[in-house]
Amino acid sequence: MKLFLHAIISLTIVSAPAFAAAPNIVIFLVDDMGVMDTSVPFLTDESGNPKVHPLNQWYRTPNMERLAKNGIRFPQFCAMSVCSPTRVSLLTGQNPARHHVTNWINPDANNHGPQGPRDWDWKGLETSDTTLPKLLRTQGYRTIHVGKGHFGPNRTEGSDPLHLGFDVNIGGNSYGQPGSYYGEKNYGKGSKQAVPHLEAYHGSSTFLTEALTLEANKQIDASIRDKKPFFLYFAQYAVHAPFQANPRFAAHYAEAKQSPAAKAFATLIESMDESLGMLLDHLEKTGEAENTLVFFLGDNGSDSPLGEAHNVGSSAPLRGKKGSHYEGGMRVPFIAAWAKPAAPNPHQQALPIPANAVQPHLASVEDIFPTVLAAAQGKVPSSHPLDGQNLRVLLSGKDDANHSDAFLMHYPHAPHRSDYWSSLRQGEWKVIYHYLPQKNGQHYQLFHLKNDPYEQNDLATKEPITLKHMMKNLIDALEQHKAQYPHDKEGKELRPVLP
């Protein structure tokens, strides 16, 4: 009888899932991927249901579809329109107007622009800064950085993610794009943009997205061996230029009437999606999928070669693209899901996420910091000002009246697709202030995004009361964040003014 009971107890121990004290957390960040660069439809119809557009039929992202079916997607999720500001906001939970990393970081020089603030924080993050991986490490996490860094220029602390709270860095440095996606080209070895730490794959046919994923999975295995929860910040270099085709997927687009660059971009999207699938498969294989919370997002609007600066080619039906003041420059895909849904799992009971759900509420990249920290049962130091808000209620599929419906974007620099501007989304309205007048002599643009989601009807002259109200809110937000401003040619600071 004792032997029989012992056998039952042993069987129970072997077959029962092992729940770690804290959930594993993955941030899967894609470079230059806009909200339309996927087969997953994010934009919704008047009833709030996802609506398929032509670009959704052009791209192939079955693993994004898989993740979306397991979790919740946000059609109104915003990031900054250029990369480094988003990446710093991810790690700090602060808006760029506050942390002052308001432009992409040039690895070798202060790229403030001819009339931009020269003292903007072009040196990026430093060891003394409060960062998400640093706080998670105090919670017992193994903190892993894989892929693109771009947190600081050469010869600064921010150039190496190991200085910012990460225990491991594979592939991260000061540069914002890879020298090459090809293992045969040693991922750009010999160039400034060479991707470090991947020598084991040099000379092979291993595409960069795959090599980084293999390394990420090795780090997951190491965390499991050490019996530590892991925080994996997986920042793909894809789908940033150079637009180099992955040969494995090129045949899918061979007959399309698009440019070679557009076809190559589509293979980069598919390669990124393959990487996501490899990661999810590995989490299931190791038994950690039920314990792993995944956040998938892009870092700014699309840079697809399908269109020019302000038309709707690359982000259709949205207007604009990366670097633009229109929604195509700031709207990005965002999916939150447990890698494998399992209702009895205590982590999933603490943070339930409905399957195949759509959350229409506005949210932004700043919100990920407090959301991840709360899931890890960590706390924000009182000395660290926070702009983001915990997404917990919104992730459950419910509305959250306490969550802000505003998004501030501040870009006091040039040159890019849009120069020297700030914008504020609040509720159904969006105001844009141009510090230098546009061709029509106006500083203002105003759009009603519910009635005009594609920003075709500028109401700045037709709605003067609303324009003044929105501009006051924009000015107040900038002042509260202690924003820096561009200057005129004589060096006088340019601040936004009421109409």
Image (cartoon, grey):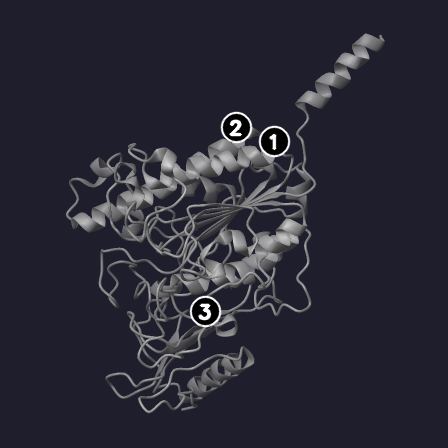
Q: Tell me if 426 is positioned left or right of 11 in this view.
A: left
Q: For the residues carrying marks 3 and 2, which lies nearer the camera in this image?
A: 3
Q: Which residue is mark 2?
A: 285
Which dot marks residue 225? 1
Which dot marks residue 101? 3
Q: Quadrant of residue 82?
A: bottom left
Q: Position of residue 1 (x, y in %)?
A: 84, 7
Q: Position of residue 361 (x, y in %)?
A: 51, 62
Q: What amino acid does circle 1 point to?
A: Arg
Mark 1 Cα within 10 Å, few/some/many (few <14, many 20+)?
few
Q: Position of residue 243 (x, y in %)?
A: 24, 49
Q: Separation of disc 2 and disc 1 at Cα?
A: 14 Å
SS under mark 1: helix
At 66% from the left edge and 29% from the top edge, which residue is drawn? 17
Pick whichever of labels 2 and 1 is earlier in the sequence: 1
Mark 3 Cα within 10 Å, few/some/many (few <14, many 20+)?
many
Mark 2 Cα within 10 Å, few/some/many (few <14, many 20+)?
few
* Callouts 3 and 1 close, C-beta under 8 Å: no
Image quadrant holding the C terminus, namely: bottom left
Q: What amino acid does circle 2 point to?
A: Lys
Vertical arrangement, residue 140 with respect to residue 412, above or below: above
Q: Position of residue 277 (x, y in %)?
A: 42, 36
Q: Does the image show residue 394?
A: no
At 32% from the left edge and 79% from the top edge, which residue is drawn? 458
SS under mark 3: loop
Q: Separation of disc 3 and disc 1 at Cα?
A: 37 Å
Q: What amino acid does circle 3 point to?
A: Val
